[in-house]
Amino acid sequence: MAQRIQGTEDLYGGYMRSWQRMCDIARELFGAYGFDAIETPAIEQVATFTHGIGESTDVVRKEMFRVFSGALLEDVFARGSEEGLKAKQRMAMRPEGTAGVVRAAVEHNFVPQGAAPAKVWYSEAMFRGERPQRGRLRQFHQVGVEWLGAEDPAADAETIIMLMEFYKRLGLPQESLTLRINSMGDGECRPAYREKVRQFILDHADEMCEDCRERADLNPLRAFDCKVDRDREIMRDAPLVTDNLCDDCRDHYAQVKKYLDEAGIKYIEDPTLVRGLDYYMRTVFEVEYTANAGIGAIGGGGRYDGLAELEGGKHTPGIGFAVGFERIMLALEDAGVNLAGEDPSCVYVANTEPELREAAFRATLALRSAGIRAEADYQGRSLKSQFKQADKHNARLCVVLGPDEVAAGVATVRDMGTHEQVQVPMADLAAKVSELLG
Ligand code: AMP
């Protein structure tokens, strides 16, 4: 039997409705904040990701799915050259949304000189070659926003406020969430800070894990995220970014916090919060579902003022976030919240004889034309089994067409809850059904 790839999921039934509901809430909320929807391709040039996310990050080094066409592989095998394959590793599946959006913004000049910022949101599948486990998939779904062309700390605060409002509208209790924020500095102050952390790791190299020793040169700040307890303990004494910010970054961070305070947003300042992608600078934030330790981060983001330049554009500041649908579903389940809502109800059209199918067909179309969700039976089942089907379809009403009814130009409408029945002229069927549905 064919099976899906481990770490991927089929979205259907209530799970699919939850995803759609999440997207509806996003459209409504983000729309009110002035964000328009965008969709960028699921495959991009490898360079789009390596330039922005960074060659040295786990996402690019270990997790990005590279894509080859069959023709390319045939060509490479025919020439027997592995080198050719490497040289042509030009396409990758997107592991995250920001790099593609910024690439699009550069390509289509979303933020012309002196123009108002561009604000976009997306809901897309992302792909990462991770070891699959609960809440960690190879294909997962994110809803995210990008606000391009705004440098002011008010944009950082608004973005975070909107994120917290999003969780609220999804039904997550605010007390189950922990928002952590930090500033990662900018091109002015970060290089010197990075060097201090590198030196710190080198000074403790013989006590630290191999990954961290490797990180010292590649991506030293990631050592703060090391999973090894001993390393984490050592990193507690490492220099903190907040003690190493330049004046501009410190002012920016202070202003963001002031706005958040003013809006009544609760947060924890975490100077060890470093997000895994190279493009972040200044404000970074992460939200964790803390009511149950097994779920972890359900969203995060930050400012990426240098990214547009890395994608070959002019300087365009930006800030955004992404939330993970599958993790949010785990959190909602834990919190006892059903995002999908009730199964949609319908009106079921039953007929007692195969000759009455045409009448059933017409009645069903009439109901649908009036905007009523309707289902009909064309299998020739018994009336009893059609009532069972009606229940399965969560029907509140069942329209029953028998030979006498059809001959008399009427239909019987049965309330599936109370089993009460009324006869309705066919011509008034849709209007009467709408009235009964209330
Ligand atoms: P990131 O882009 O890594 O900051 O991810 C943003 C959010 O996406 C996280 O907070 C998670 O909720 C979710 N996420 C990231 N990676 C995965 C994954 N492999 N599987 C499921 N959700 C993920």
Image (cartoon, rainbow, N blue to C red):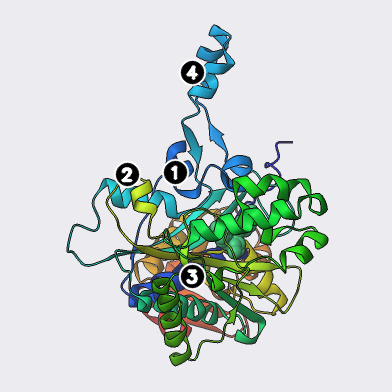
Residue 282 horizontal/vertical position (percent): 46, 67
Three-letter residue code for mark 1? His
Determine if residue 353 is in view: no
Are the residues at dot 2 and dot 1 in contact (C-beta closer than 8 Å)? yes
Q: Which of 303 and 265 is in front in this view?
A: 303
- Side (left or right) of 430 relative to 335: left
Q: Quadrant of the N terminus?
A: top right
Q: Label 2, on which residue?
A: 312
Q: In which quarter of the image is the C terminus?
A: bottom left
Q: In this rendering, which labeled residue sits more in front, label 1 or label 4? A: 1
Tag of residue 51: 1
Q: Distance between the residues labelled 3 and 4?
A: 51 Å
What crowding class fits label 3: few (fewer than 14 Cα within 10 Å), some (14-19), or many (20 or more)?
Answer: many
Q: Earlier in the sequence, mark 4 or mark 2?
A: 4
Q: Earlier in the sequence, mark 1 or mark 4?
A: 1
Q: In this view, does 392 lie above or below 174?
A: above
Q: Which of marks 2 and 1 is nearer the N terminus?
A: 1
Q: Is residue 127 above or below residue 121?
A: above
